[in-house]
Image (cartoon, helix red, strand yellow):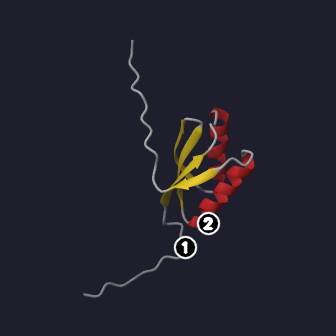
Amino acid sequence: NILPSHWATEDSEDINFTAYLCLNMLLNDEQISELIYLCRKEKVGVETVRSHEDKTYVNIVVHNRKQIAEIIRNLRMHFGFPRISRLAQPVAINEPAKVAS
């Protein structure tokens, strides 16, 4: 059996994958809104934004590596050049359970 191959170009809009970013700064609500706005402006989806121990973790949906590099550059310029790193997988943050009184 021979299966035909259909190679997708790197610029294909149909291919999406999740990238995990860590900003070495704690973002307030207004800054999180700005981050989401900047991502949407670049056609980057935002799945989650979580803060933990003076860092902010962001899961984004992109089409290619070039888009990741562009959004990291734009976020660094916008927020005063904090360190932003791409993670291989999402960070597991154990949040304490909230008990109703």
Q: Position of residue 20 (x, y in %)?
A: 52, 52
For the residue labelled by badge 2, is the local secondary structure a helix, a strand or a loop?
Answer: helix
The residue that appears at 31% across and 84% down in the rendered structure is 3
First-in-chain label (1 vs 2)? 1
Left or right relative to 85: residue 4? left
> Residue at coordinates 29% horizontally, 88% vertically from top-left?
2
Element at label 1? loop
Q: Residue at x 54, y 66 (%)?
A: 13
Q: Which mark is residue 38?
A: none
**Kind of residue at badge 1:** Glu
Category of crowding for the residue at label 2, using alpha-carbon neighbours closer than 10 angstroms: few (below 14), some (14–19), many (at least 20): few
Residue most toward the bottom?
2
Q: Quadrant of residue 5?
A: bottom left
Residue 95 x, y percent position in the rendering = 43, 31
Graded by Cα atoms within 10 Å as few (under 14), some (14 to 19) or many (20 or more), the crowding at tag 1 reads: few
Position of the N terminus, as image quadrant, is bottom left
Residue where numbered disc 2 is placed: 66
Q: Nearer the viewer, residue 25 or 50?
A: 25
Of badges 1 and 2, nearer the viewer stands 2
Q: Are marks 1 and 2 in contact (CB under 8 Å)?
A: yes
Tell me the tag on residue 10: 1
Residue farthest to the top? 101
